[in-house]
Image (spheres, grey):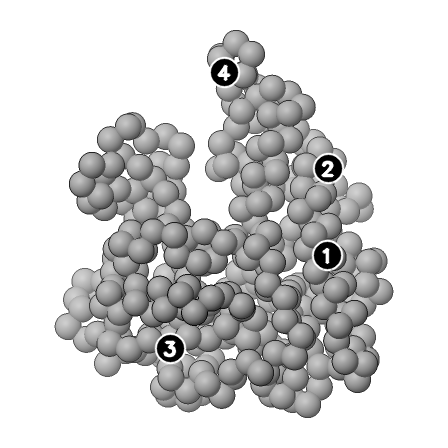
Amino acid sequence: MKSIGIDLGTANTLVYVKGRGIVLREPSVVAVEAKTQKVVAVGSEAKLMLGKTPGSIVAMRPLKNGVIAEFDITASMLRHYFKKVSGNTLLSRPKVIICIPYGVTEVERRAVEDVTLEAGAQSVALVEEPIAAAIGSGLRVEDARGSMIVDIGGGTTEVAVMSLGGIVQPSSLRIAGDELDEAIVSYIKRKYNILIGETTAELLKKRIGSVHKMTDRGAMEIRGRNLLNGLPAIVTITSAEIREAMQDEVLHIVESIRNALENTPPELASDIYDTGIMLSGGGALLAGLDLLISRVTGIRTVIAKNPIDCVAVGIGRIIETTGDASAYVNYRTR
């Protein structure tokens, strides 16, 4: 019987299988027939359809802000991934440990449990995302020493100060990668009267996105639809423009980090000043973010090795070291 860990993210889903490591990295996107809700495509194949489907097919992300928005479609997506990692057989129903954002409601927690069981799991245990991210990034969360993780995903930014295996000062912000993409769409619409899709906005963010002048990354030509005449249009966008577009959302994230530090007990704050702030999640790859956080907080900020994998790796380490997914309670928050 397999023990597997799932980083069920708004943007991407990663699956860790005991003894094998991370075996699946796929976008959290599903394409379904509009009338029957029959699944047409899942993951990378479905993501290519975003913004391009005919009226009979709908491509969507079934999670929003880190929580389940479409129960049945999320279950179908997980069922597909279970089959993919188990060689198209569900004869051995897996024990699953799955992450959730910090501070979700009891209803949202129950929805994650129910959807995982519905997808074919034998049992499900939950671990909060900051804990998994911290373990996966190499922080020694069990020590009597303060450490800080900032995990920026697609739907949520998780900020946590930890000590002795628990979260002492938590903050969960529903501003992350998706909101940055939306800000870029709005900025280009407002400035150029050109409408682009979220896929193009995400590409702009990844290729030339920057939040600090020292990390400018040139310019990029994009195509969209001119809102004045309805015709296709081409415009060149600079790194400085993307920085301006994302400014408000980035400042919200930085402010949540500063607030967490201000509310941290003095002894732990002193430890963090020594150990630094660890960045994980896809948002950690935003050029200059570490420099900006360091400048605002005065604390050394480092990016985790393979930041996108941190949550899945952290869940994996819990599975590998305990032999039982349910033992995640050793890391229960206070």
Residue 37 shown left or right of residue 228 in the figure: left
Q: Are marks 4 and 2 in contact (CB under 8 Å)?
A: no
Q: Are marks 2 and 3 in contact (CB under 8 Å)?
A: no
Q: Amino acid at mark 3?
A: Ala
Q: Name the residue at the top extreme.
A: 229
Identity of the amino acid at label 1? Val
Q: Earlier in the sequence, mark 1 or mark 2?
A: 2
User: Disc 1 marks which residue?
Assistant: 254
Gap between marks 4 and 3, in whole Å?
A: 49 Å
CA gap between label 2 and label 3 equals: 41 Å
Q: Which residue is mark 3?
A: 125
In the image shown, does 126 or 103 lie closer to the viewer?
Answer: 103
**Looking at the image, is mark 1 or mark 3 earlier in the sequence?**
3
Instruction: Tell me which label, 4 or 2, sits earlier in the chain.
Output: 4
Q: Quadrant of residue 245?
A: top right
Answer left or right for 210 relative to 122: right
Residue beneath the point at 74% across and 41% down:
216
Residue 248 appears in view: yes
Identify which residue, 94 or 255, lies in the foreground.
Answer: 255
Secondary structure beneath disc 1?
Answer: helix
Q: Residue at x 31, y 37 (%)?
A: 58
